[in-house]
Image (tube, rainbow, N blue to C red):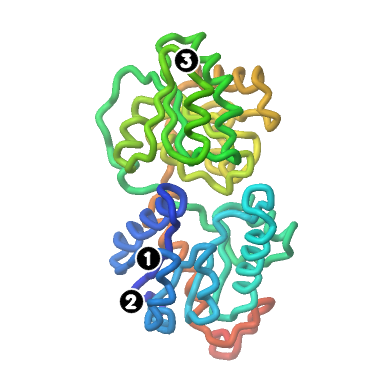
Amino acid sequence: MATPEKVLITSGHEVGGLTAFAAGLSEGFTALGIPSEVVSPGRIFKRWRDLRDPSVLKILSTTAVFAAPFARRAICVAHGFPRADAQGWARMAMIVASFKLANSLSQARLVAVSDYVAAHLRGLFNLKVDATIRNPVQLSFLEPSAEVAGRRYLTYVGRLIPAKNVHRLLPAMCDLQRENPDLRICIIGDGPQRAELESSFRTDPPIEFTGDLDPLDVRRYLQRTKVFVSGNEMEPFGITYLEALSQGCAVGMPACGGGVEIALDFVGARVQLLPLSFERQGVLSALRRALNSTDTPVSLAGYEPKAVAEAYLETGKSLLFTKIDRRERTPCASNRYV
């Protein structure tokens, strides 16, 4: 029972983000020799037998946390914290309720994907976080690749929504392109802002808007990318940061968010921080520094799928005990917890 017979992982609704998390984590359990299955949050209640089976470890994303009261041995993952400006007050209240529900259950644990998320859940919502386990990067990004000559892209990967601030980054990105005629700007992803961005930013050469791409195609673009740029100042973690660093890119990210935790030792070298005001000249200065940064290798060993899966298994061990005081576990004479 210490090692589950199977792991059930819920993913997200869109390409990237939760989908990449679930795929990477599944690869980790496969490396450990433990069968795993990725299911959509909407189908989790159709897996009633697995929900009730303590030999099956359930790793539930935010929208699937409401299945936790019916589950035996579940880890609820906070991939971020609720934002009223982006999600609305009603959805924010539902997310907070789902996390509080996870806190109240003896057969569930609440895990955050970064210390940044954990701090906000504690400080803003008085939630108990049982562990911080950072997200994995998929194995396809860790495989050796042939050296690609002539990195020339300035690249963004993610959804095209206001919270990602692509519209605030593009003016400075275009300025950098004009200073460096060999540079090309590539925007990978889709969303409600795409049409507006395409019509508002017409440069020569034009910006490449690719839409959503599969991981292998994203990897190919990153191998030709000099600087990867992100604009979400409240990024909970940022799997795309890992993907970019794994392919040798310099990274420009806001001076806030869980992404800063990924490569703290490289801030000011491979990682350049953007001003939270997104003031055009400040962003341009940071992108210039990133463009001229040295290609210093970054170790991503802690983000390999197998290492992350092992961390989830370690957190899941306490779920073997059916009667647990979440505030203080008292050992009995046999050194087991009751």
Distance Cα–Cα, label 3 vs label 2: 55 Å
Which residue is denoted by mark 2 in the rendering? 5
Q: In which image quadrant can residue 212 be found? A: top left
Taking the spot 27% from the left edge, 34% from the top edge, the residue there is: 145
Distance Cα–Cα, label 3 vs label 1: 42 Å
- Expressed as whole percent of the image width and height from the top left, the position of residue 238 reads 51, 44
Taking the spot 50% from the left edge, 68% from the top edge, the residue there is: 64
Give the mark toward the camera: 3 or 1: 3
Q: Return the mark for residue 203.
A: 3
Q: Is label 1 in contact with label 2 (beta carbons under 8 Å)?
A: no
Q: Disc 2 marks which amino acid?
A: Glu
- Expressed as whole percent of the image width and height from the top left, the position of residue 198 reads 47, 26
Q: Disc 3 marks which amino acid?
A: Thr
Taking the spot 42% from the left edge, 72% from the top edge, the residue there is: 44
- Give whichever of discs 1 and 2 has the lower sequence position: 2
Is 294 drawn above or below residue 82 in the view shown?
above
